[in-house]
Every structure is written in C-alpha cells, then in structure tokens.
C-alpha cells in the first residue's frame, strides 16, 4: 500500500467513527428527553434547552472529526 491509500483509509475511518458516535449520542439525548416529557409534560420548558445544548455539544464532536478529515 502506498501513502495515498493509507491516507484515504484514515480519512474514511475518521469520518465514519466521528459521525457514528455523535449520531448515537444525539439519538439517546433526544430519546431520553422525549421520554421525560412524555412522563411529565409540564417539564418541557425545563428540558428543552439542556437537550439542545447536549445535542449541540455532541454535534461538535462530529464537526471536529470533519475538520480532522480535511486536515489529513
């Protein structure tokens, strides 16, 4: 294998792992928030902002992975 092939495989692995785990995290965050709202609808206003912040922080990990892929 030459250097270009190894570079391509590294990019593919970085974006695959860097996209998969944040997607799972966002799914879990939203799932638990919707479950909590379903159990206690009055808590929606208290749960919405922390849910969005958690999803944004998880999405930041995917953006970091994308930046790494572009710099490789």
Image (tube, rainbow, N blue to C red):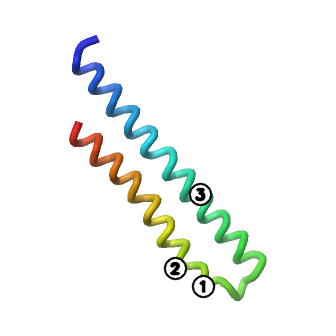
Q: CA distance from mark 3 to mark 2?
A: 16 Å
Residue 2, image quadrant: top left
Foreground mark, 3 or 1, reads 1
Left or right of residue 42: residue 15: left
- Residue at which label 1 appears: 46
Asked whether the beta carbons under mark 3 and mark 1 sit within 8 Å of each other, the answer is no
Q: Secondary structure at mark 3?
A: helix
Residue placed at 45% from the left, 46% from the top?
A: 19
Q: Secondary structure at mark 2?
A: helix
Expressed as whole percent of the image width and height from the top left, the position of residue 3 reads 22, 18
Of the numbered discs 3 and 2, the one sitting upstream in the chain is 3
Expressed as whole percent of the image width and height from the top left, the position of residue 48 reads 56, 79
Asked whether the beta carbons under mark 1 and mark 2 sit within 8 Å of each other, the answer is yes
Q: Residue furthest top?
A: 1
Q: Secondary structure at mark 1?
A: helix
Q: Say few, some or many: other residues with alpha carbon within 10 Å of mark 3 (under 14 / 14 to 19 / 20 or more).
A: few
Residue 42, image quadrant: bottom right
Q: Say few, some or many: other residues with alpha carbon within 10 Å of mark 2 (under 14 / 14 to 19 / 20 or more).
A: few
- Residue at which label 3 appears: 27
Residue placed at 52% from the left, 79% from the top?
A: 49
| Quarter that holds the C terminus | top left
Residue placed at 59% from the left, 63% from the top?
A: 29
Expressed as whole percent of the image width and height from the top left, the position of residue 60 reads 39, 59
Asked whether the beta carbons under mark 3 and mark 2 sit within 8 Å of each other, the answer is no
- Residue at which label 2 appears: 49
Left or right of residue 11: residue 59: right
């Amino acid at each position: 294998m030459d250097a270009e092939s190894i570079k391509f495989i590294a990019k593919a692995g970085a974006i695959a792992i860097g996209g998969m785990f944040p997607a799972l995290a966002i799914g879990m965050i939203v799932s638990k928030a919707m479950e909590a709202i379903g159990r206690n609808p009055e808590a929606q206003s208290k749960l919405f902002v922390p849910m969005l912040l958690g999803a944004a922080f998880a999405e930041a990990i995917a953006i970091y992975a994308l930046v790494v892929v572009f710099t490789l």
